[in-house]
Image (cartoon, rainbow, N blue to C red):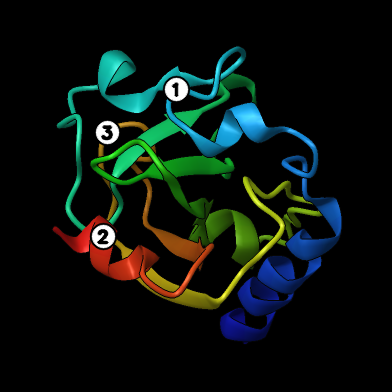
Amino acid sequence: MLRPIILSAALAAGSAAFADGHDAMMQAPPGEPFVQVSDALPLPEFIPGLGTLFVNPDMLPAGPFLAYDHDGMLSATIYMTPLAELEGGTSYDDLALGASEVTSVDIYYNAGHPGVEAPHAHVVLYHDDGAKGRLAE
Protein backbone atom coordinates (compact mmCIF):
# COMPACT_ATOMS: atom_id res chain seq x y z
CA MET A 1 0.00 0.00 0.00
CA LEU A 2 2.80 2.38 -0.87
CA ARG A 3 0.76 4.60 -3.20
CA PRO A 4 -1.68 5.92 -0.58
CA ILE A 5 1.23 6.83 1.70
CA ILE A 6 2.99 8.81 -1.01
CA LEU A 7 -0.19 10.50 -2.20
CA SER A 8 -1.17 11.50 1.33
CA ALA A 9 2.30 13.00 1.81
CA ALA A 10 1.86 15.05 -1.35
CA LEU A 11 -1.57 16.28 -0.31
CA ALA A 12 -0.45 17.09 3.23
CA ALA A 13 2.33 19.22 1.77
CA GLY A 14 -0.21 21.78 0.64
CA SER A 15 -0.69 22.88 4.23
CA ALA A 16 2.99 23.71 4.67
CA ALA A 17 3.76 26.11 1.84
CA PHE A 18 6.78 28.25 2.66
CA ALA A 19 6.60 30.29 -0.51
CA ASP A 20 3.59 32.37 0.44
CA GLY A 21 4.99 35.87 0.71
CA HIS A 22 8.45 34.77 -0.45
CA ASP A 23 8.55 36.11 -3.99
CA ALA A 24 12.33 35.69 -4.07
CA MET A 25 11.86 31.91 -4.36
CA MET A 26 9.81 32.28 -7.52
CA GLN A 27 12.97 33.06 -9.53
CA ALA A 28 16.25 31.11 -9.46
CA PRO A 29 18.37 31.09 -7.43
CA PRO A 30 16.18 30.90 -4.32
CA GLY A 31 18.94 31.95 -1.89
CA GLU A 32 20.19 30.38 1.31
CA PRO A 33 19.91 27.73 2.62
CA PHE A 34 19.26 26.30 -0.86
CA VAL A 35 22.14 25.08 -3.03
CA GLN A 36 22.06 24.18 -6.68
CA VAL A 37 22.08 20.39 -6.87
CA SER A 38 24.43 20.35 -9.88
CA ASP A 39 27.02 22.30 -7.86
CA ALA A 40 26.96 19.68 -5.08
CA LEU A 41 26.55 16.45 -7.07
CA PRO A 42 27.73 15.06 -10.42
CA LEU A 43 24.46 15.93 -12.17
CA PRO A 44 23.73 18.23 -15.13
CA GLU A 45 22.61 21.78 -14.41
CA PHE A 46 19.27 21.15 -16.15
CA ILE A 47 17.74 17.68 -15.88
CA PRO A 48 15.07 17.09 -18.54
CA GLY A 49 11.78 16.41 -16.76
CA LEU A 50 12.97 17.97 -13.49
CA GLY A 51 14.64 21.24 -14.46
CA THR A 52 17.36 23.08 -12.55
CA LEU A 53 17.15 21.83 -8.98
CA PHE A 54 17.89 23.56 -5.68
CA VAL A 55 17.66 21.91 -2.24
CA ASN A 56 18.37 22.72 1.38
CA PRO A 57 20.99 20.02 2.23
CA ASP A 58 19.54 19.72 5.74
CA MET A 59 16.26 18.50 4.24
CA LEU A 60 17.68 15.51 2.35
CA PRO A 61 16.67 13.00 1.20
CA ALA A 62 13.03 14.04 0.86
CA GLY A 63 13.51 17.71 0.06
CA PRO A 64 11.70 19.77 -1.09
CA PHE A 65 13.72 20.22 -4.25
CA LEU A 66 12.78 23.44 -6.02
CA ALA A 67 12.64 22.92 -9.80
CA TYR A 68 13.19 25.88 -12.12
CA ASP A 69 12.71 26.02 -15.89
CA HIS A 70 15.28 27.39 -18.39
CA ASP A 71 14.12 30.96 -17.68
CA GLY A 72 14.66 30.51 -13.94
CA MET A 73 10.93 30.38 -13.10
CA LEU A 74 9.86 28.12 -10.24
CA SER A 75 7.86 25.38 -11.95
CA ALA A 76 7.63 22.49 -9.49
CA THR A 77 8.37 21.25 -6.01
CA ILE A 78 9.80 17.73 -5.93
CA TYR A 79 10.15 15.22 -3.11
CA MET A 80 12.40 12.17 -3.33
CA THR A 81 11.19 9.69 -0.74
CA PRO A 82 13.23 6.47 -0.32
CA LEU A 83 11.00 3.42 -0.69
CA ALA A 84 12.75 1.46 2.08
CA GLU A 85 12.15 4.29 4.53
CA LEU A 86 8.46 4.50 3.59
CA GLU A 87 8.09 0.72 3.85
CA GLY A 88 9.81 0.88 7.25
CA GLY A 89 7.24 3.34 8.52
CA THR A 90 9.05 6.67 8.04
CA SER A 91 6.67 9.53 7.44
CA TYR A 92 7.49 12.83 5.86
CA ASP A 93 5.06 15.24 7.47
CA ASP A 94 4.46 18.92 6.78
CA LEU A 95 6.73 19.05 3.73
CA ALA A 96 7.06 22.57 2.41
CA LEU A 97 6.09 23.78 -1.04
CA GLY A 98 7.98 26.16 -3.27
CA ALA A 99 4.70 27.82 -4.27
CA SER A 100 1.20 27.44 -2.88
CA GLU A 101 -0.53 26.78 -6.23
CA VAL A 102 -0.36 23.17 -7.43
CA THR A 103 -2.06 22.34 -10.73
CA SER A 104 -1.07 18.67 -11.05
CA VAL A 105 1.01 15.96 -9.38
CA ASP A 106 3.13 13.15 -10.88
CA ILE A 107 4.45 10.27 -8.78
CA TYR A 108 6.92 7.80 -10.24
CA TYR A 109 9.66 5.32 -9.35
CA ASN A 110 13.38 6.11 -9.60
CA ALA A 111 16.04 3.42 -9.10
CA GLY A 112 18.47 5.93 -7.58
CA HIS A 113 20.90 8.63 -8.68
CA PRO A 114 23.65 10.77 -7.12
CA GLY A 115 22.30 12.42 -4.00
CA VAL A 116 19.48 9.92 -3.46
CA GLU A 117 21.13 6.62 -4.31
CA ALA A 118 18.45 4.31 -2.88
CA PRO A 119 15.34 3.45 -4.89
CA HIS A 120 12.78 6.15 -4.24
CA ALA A 121 9.60 7.81 -5.43
CA HIS A 122 9.66 11.18 -7.13
CA VAL A 123 6.62 13.20 -6.11
CA VAL A 124 6.44 16.19 -8.46
CA LEU A 125 3.99 19.01 -7.73
CA TYR A 126 3.66 21.31 -10.75
CA HIS A 127 2.88 24.95 -9.98
CA ASP A 128 1.17 26.00 -13.23
CA ASP A 129 -0.41 24.44 -16.30
CA GLY A 130 2.68 24.82 -18.53
CA ALA A 131 5.27 23.72 -15.95
CA LYS A 132 5.57 20.08 -16.98
CA GLY A 133 6.23 21.05 -20.60
CA ARG A 134 8.84 23.66 -19.66
CA LEU A 135 10.72 21.18 -17.45
CA ALA A 136 10.65 18.48 -20.13
CA GLU A 137 12.66 20.51 -22.64
- Quarter assignment of residue 45: top left
Q: Residue at the spot x=73%, y=76% of the render?
A: 8
Q: Please, what is the three-letter code of the amino acid marked with disc 3? A: Pro
**Element class at badge 1:** loop
Percent from the top left, x then y, of residue 94? 83, 52
* Front position in the image: 96 or 62: 96
Q: Earlier in the sequence, mark 1 or mark 3?
A: 1
Q: Position of residue 67 (x, y in %)?
A: 41, 45
* Circle 3 SS class: loop
Residue highlighted by disc 2 = 134
In contact (CB < 8 Å): disc 2 and disc 1:
no
Decide if residue 96 is on the left or right side of residue 73.
Answer: right
Provide residue 13's location: percent of width, then percent of height.
75, 60
107 vs 18, left or right, is: left
Disc 3 target residue = 114
Looking at the image, residue 2 lies above or below residue 41: below
Q: How many marks?
A: 3
Answer with mark 3 or mark 2, whichever residue precedes in sequence: 3
* Amino acid tagged 2: Arg
Q: Earlier in the sequence, mark 2 or mark 1?
A: 1
For the residues labelled 3 and 2, the Cα–Cα distance comes to 23 Å
List x then y, in percent, for residue 132.
Answer: 33, 68
Quadrant in which the C terminus is drawn:
bottom left
Disc 1 marks which residue? 29
- Of tags 1 and 3, the one toward the viewer is 1
Q: Which secondary structure lies at badge 2?
A: helix
Question: Which quarter of the figure has residue 129?
Answer: bottom left
Rounded to the nearest whole Å, what is the CA distance between mark 1 and mark 3? 21 Å
C-alpha gap between disc 2 and disc 1: 17 Å
